Image (cartoon, rainbow, N blue to C red):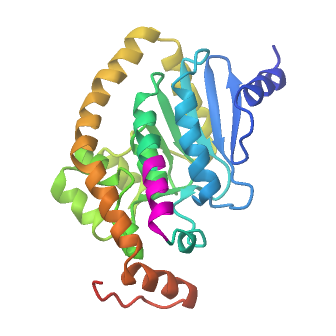
Amino acid sequence: MTPRETAGSAEKEYSGYRALHFERLDDVLQVVIDHPTSDLNAVDELLHDEFTRLFRELKRERRARVVLLTARGRAFSAGGDFDWFPSLDDLEKLEALRRDAKQMIWDLLDVEVPIVVALNGHAIGLGASLALLCDTVFIAENATIADPHVRVGLVAGDGGVAIWPLVLGPSRAKRYLMTGDALTAEEAEHMGLVQFVVQSEELQAQALAFAQRLAQGAPLAIRYTKQAVNKLVKDALNVAFDTSTALEIVTFQSEDHAEALAALRDGRKPQFRGR
């Protein structure tokens, strides 16, 4: 089977996606984020819906032994699309978003095959959470990782309040979650958020080589090891996820969030009032 035929077969199996593209590389299924209207792969309704669908469908993946998740463009995912946020203007829409977000994260943790992530650029907000909840993360040396929900007046409600403390400890995690400060690739590796920092031009090759190495291992042993470790992650999510997403809905309706969006449009510093 030629590479073109292999790629075509994956697109047929995972049909109907507009912001995600699929290619089979032997035992590795490569998933590429490539938003048709955002070079930063910002999360809008389209990408949020497709992430939700992706992890649900990856739970049923039977051919691949490993998934390699990466992106095209200037970022892996630069977080939420600020033009989308104002449309989330009532409780019905926010509740639907909360339910999809919860299903997305839990389905991600239930994907049995290992997921290797190659961060080609900045991973922000939900992009950071998804990457950190996967299994092994490669990051380009010029990329950063951050969860800056608070900078737009929102609670970090997409899994960040679980995975950052689990990796960094509560004290250090709060330092980054309460400021939204970004970590460089080297800082993220030093703190254990990612496993490999590589030069940008080597990212794809090295991440794929690692994915292929996993694919050559004993599939059941690797899958079951992953499932056992993810029990710890699920425990952390059980403690924090519902609370954080409920509070995120509260902050979506706050004056501070509206002020943050207005300040972004006006190119000024927001004036938060705590209401």
Q: Position of residue 103 (x, y in %)?
A: 44, 41
184 to 105, vertically: above or below? below
Instruction: Left or right? Give the position of 110 relative to 172.
Output: right
| Majority secondary structure of magenta residues | helix
The number of numbered badges drawn on the structure is 0
Name the residue rendered at 64%, 59% in the picture.
74
Q: Position of residue 206 (x, y in %)?
A: 56, 33
Q: Position of residue 164 (x, y in %)?
A: 29, 51
Name the residue rendered at 31%, 44% in the picture.
192
158 to 270, vertically: above or below? above
Quarter of the N terminus within the rendering:
top right
Work out whether residue 180 can be spotted.
no
Q: Which residues are magenta?
A: 90-100
Residue lying farthest to the left in this orientation:
171
Residues 199 and 257: in front is 257
Q: Position of residue 92 (x, y in %)?
A: 48, 61
129 to 222, vertically: above or below? below
Work out whether residue 11 can be spotted.
yes
Res. 54 image quadrant:
top right
Quarter of the C terminus within the rendering:
bottom left
Residues 123 and 104: in front is 104
Residue lying farthest to the front in this orientation:
92
Residues 86 and 212: in front is 86
Name the residue rendered at 55%, 47% in the picture.
199
Residues 21 and 135: in front is 21
Q: Is residue 153 magenta?
A: no
61 to 219, vertically: above or below? below
